[in-house]
Image (tube, grey):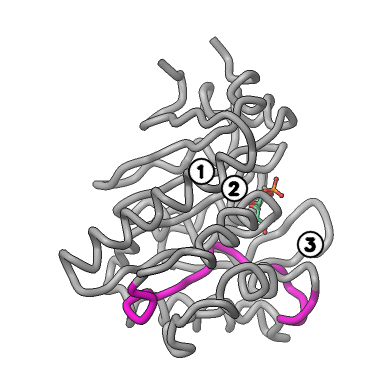
């Protein structure tokens, strides 16, 4: 029994974690396509999800034409920059599967007007997913300081409740970001954190005691899942 909210899945080794989360995503996608004819997902950035995306890219029999892809956050850099979450998702997944290009909703964090870009993406998400938007699966990572997406401690993004996307401010390069907001993430049907390694102890403790931004991830009507490898699970409090 984990002290984390929602359902905790402890999967042993990092490569098994990636395969297991890919299978979980595919199952949610099949359910969504069966139920509604479409599957929407917001991809996480950072390094942890890359292996999951690579496992997805190797999967067969997937109704990729019914997938609609959003991003949880994006760094303010060119979209082909190695730091770009979009670039990582293309390299690991999107360039290898038949998701229609107009079904991929890239976050335009390479814009010179980040406030305007955030407003545009809020509108884009709302047109695609309704108001309030309901995304089938939102994937999230967990930073060592307890940030998730680009909702960083002590930043204005944590207080945004009237938009689906806003500016983020990281404490490492690239500092400027775009991020989905709490309302956009918490409206999802399924929210899944992917956490690997032993460096997230403080962040996981912060989830339990409610002191970090990722503790604000609480699905309004959906489910919250934690996918941890053994090293991350070993740092869980309690
Ligand atoms: C980003 C991510 C960020 C990431 C965490 C964990 O743009 O960096 O959205 O929230 O998920 O920092 O990153 P790792 O998976 O690399 O530990």
Q: Is residue 109 left or right of residue 4?
A: right
**Which residues fall within the magenta stretch?**
63-81
Asked if the beta carbon under badge 1 is closer than 8 A to the nearest atom of ligand 1, the reply is no
Neighbor class of circle 3 (other Cα within 10 Å; few <14, some 14-19, many 20+) is few
Asked if the beta carbon under badge 2 is closer than 8 A to the nearest atom of ligand 1, the reply is yes
Q: Is residue 100 above or below residue 31?
A: below
- Determine the image quadrant of residue 224: top left
Neighbor class of circle 1 (other Cα within 10 Å; few <14, some 14-19, many 20+) is many
If you read the primary sequence from the N terminus, does the residue marked by circle 1 or circle 3 appear first?
3
Q: Nearer the viewer, residue 76 or 168?
A: 76
The picture places residue 5, in percent across and down from the top left corner, at 40, 29
Distance of label 2 from label 3 (alpha carbons): 17 Å
Q: Is residue 140 above or below residue 67?
A: above
The picture places residue 128, in percent across and down from the top left corner, at 33, 80
**What is the number of callouts on the image?**
3
The picture places residue 202, in percent across and down from the top left corner, at 68, 26
- Determine the image quadrant of residue 176: bottom right
Residue contact between numbered discs 2 and 1, judged by CB atoms under 8 Å: yes
* Residue 175 numbered tag: 3
Q: Of helix, strand and loop, which one carries label 2?
A: loop
Q: Nearer the viewer, residue 34 or 199?
A: 34
Q: Residue at x 37, y 58 (%)?
A: 26
If you read the primary sequence from the N terminus, does the residue marked by circle 2 or circle 1 appear first?
2
The residue that disc 1 covers is 193
Q: Of helix, strand and loop, which one carries label 1?
A: strand
Q: Is residue 189 above or below residue 209?
A: below
The residue that disc 2 covers is 141
In the rendered image, the quadrant that contains the C terminus is top right
């Amino acid at each position: 029994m984990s002290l984390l909210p929602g359902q905790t899945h402890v999967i042993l080794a990092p490569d098994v974690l990636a395969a297991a989360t890919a299978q979980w995503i595919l199952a949610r996608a099949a359910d969504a396509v069966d139920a509604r004819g479409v599957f929407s997902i917001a991809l996480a950035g950072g390094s942890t999800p890359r292996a999951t995306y690579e496992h997805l890219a190797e999967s067969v029999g997937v109704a990729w034409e019914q997938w609609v892809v959003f991003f949880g956050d994006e760094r303010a850099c060119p979209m082909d920059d190695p730091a770009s979450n979009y670039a990582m998702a293309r390299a690991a997944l999107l360039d290898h599967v038949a998701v229609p290009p107009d079904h991929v909703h890239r976050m335009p964090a390479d814009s010179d007007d980040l406030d305007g870009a955030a407003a545009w993406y809020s509108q884009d998400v709302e047109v695609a997913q309704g108001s309030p938007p309901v995304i089938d699966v939102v994937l999230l990572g967990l930073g060592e300081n307890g940030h998730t997406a680009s909702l960083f401690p002590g930043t204005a993004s944590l207080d945004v409740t009237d938009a689906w996307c806003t500016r983020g401010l990281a404490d490492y390069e690239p500092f400027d970001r775009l991020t989905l907001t709490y309302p956009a993430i918490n409206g999802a049907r399924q929210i899944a954190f992917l956490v690997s390694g032993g460096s997230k102890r403080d962040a996981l403790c912060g989830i339990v005691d409610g002191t970090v931004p990722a503790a604000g991830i609480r699905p309004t009507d959906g489910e919250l899942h934690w996918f941890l490898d053994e090293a991350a699970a070993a740092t869980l409090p309690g």
